[in-house]
Amino acid sequence: MSLSGNPLDFLLAFLGGVVVSFTPCLYPLLPIIVTYIGAEGVSSRKRGLVLSLIYVTGLSITYAVLGLIAAVTGSIFGEFSSLPWVRIVAGVVILLFGFSLWRGTGGGFRLILNVPILRKPGTYLSCLILGLTSGLVVGPCTAPVLGSILTFVATKRNFVYGAFLLFSFAYGMGLLLILAGTFSSFLALLPKSGRWMESIRKLCAAILFIAGIYIMSSGITNLVDVYLEESKAAVRDNYTTELDFSLRDLQGNKITLSDFRHRKSVILFFWTTWCPFCRRELDKLNQIYPALISDNIELLAINVEEAEYRVKRFLKTNLAVFPILLDLDAAVAEAYGLVGVPTFVFINKIGKVVFQDHYFPQNTYKRLLIGK
């Protein structure tokens, strides 16, 4: 398990934490927290920095654990989190969080621990414990943002990614505290609490609105795509059987389509070297080809009406891990009624064409070819 996420995600999470630290729930508490952990008025900047870092690290550890739990929860649901309706629900949840934050009724929760060590502020241990427990004190401004991030992390199902994303968010929230604890004059430089903090809160809410609408719309789009693909498959139930052909590959071997009947399902991918969309599909097919083979599906990439030397020259700089066949006179393309490239033709084991279109149906190809 690796981070497997865009580094920009962690930067955005950190910046999001910084923005949240200016909301009315957190910003006015800054001087109080600095005083409590003992970072205010210390003779050494180094000690103020260490105390502040220990507190923020404790806070970050708690948030990282929450991120880990969210990732584990998403992993338990497995492939369900990639289903369109799950994205729609996640988008609606984030929209509700955004609405709650806009109204300032985040409905936070808190867990107060009566720990004796917390009565002795200014020690390293008390700062760490206070930071750990502060992560469980979620106010009306932080609850919607934290809940939205946890919802997003649950859809990723990556333990390390989830933990580090929440860790970055928590350190963003603690940046002002670290600066204030290290430099005694920093608090005096900060603007006083006022109505501007309400604008920050509403900005955060607007960001949640946008994120929720985006995630929900992507789920709706996928749901529509699945419906259209299934509708097309239903229409094609009366499709004709495969149009058999024999073509040569780049090694001169003769490949006959009917040889795969009753042994494998087959995907025909019609393409050309000059088509930019075909190149993009080639990259995607390279990635999923091992999965196709494991599902007993063969992929035949049929180049349409291009000279062999041109195809070979193209493949020197563009990888293709699957068989490349040459339809030199476009006879096979014409037989299948091609009106452009790229075109995908799906043929099941019994030789029936079950799908033909200009895109790869990522969500339903297994169902179309092998009934999964």
Image (tube, grey):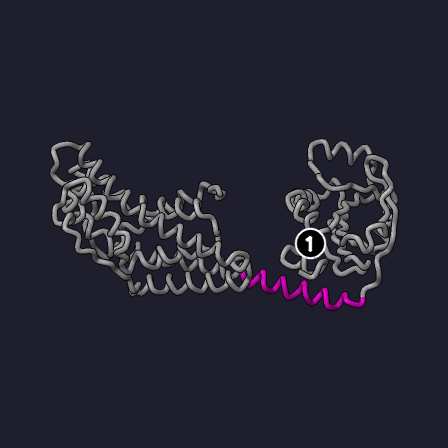
Residue 275 against residue 193 in the figure, above or below: above
Point out the stretch of residues depicted in magenta: 219-238
Residue 37 against residue 90 in the figure, above or below: above
**Residue at image x 68%, y 48%?**
294
Q: Position of residue 22 (x, y in %)?
A: 27, 50
Compared across the picture, whether 162 is left or right of 172 comes to: right
Compared across the picture, whether 246 is left or right of 46 comes to: right
Q: Quadrant of residue 125?
A: top left
Q: Counting other residues with Cα less than 10 Å from the Cα at mark 1, is it few (<14), some (14-19), or many (20 or more)? A: some
Circle 1 residue: 359
Residue 329 against residue 200 in the figure, above or below: above
As for residue 227 lying within the magenta part, the answer is: yes
Q: Position of residue 321 (x, y in %)?
A: 71, 39
**Residue at image x 81%, y 42%?**
325
As for residue 147 lying within the magenta part, the answer is: no
Magenta-drawn stretch, dominant element (helix, strand or loop): helix
* Residue type at tag 1: Tyr
Q: Quadrant of residue 339?
A: bottom right
The residue closer to the viewer here, 232 or 193, is 232
Q: Quadrant of residue 370?
A: bottom right
**Residue 18 visible in the current orientation:** no
**Residue at image x 37%, y 58%?**
147
**Residue 72 visible in the current orientation:** yes
Q: Secondary structure at mark 1?
A: loop
User: How many discs appear?
Assistant: 1
Compared across the picture, whether 84 is left or right of 232 comes to: left
**Residue at image x 26%, y 44%?**
56
Q: Position of residue 178 (x, y in %)?
A: 24, 40
Q: Quadrant of the C terminus?
A: bottom right
Q: Position of residue 259 (x, y in %)?
A: 85, 50
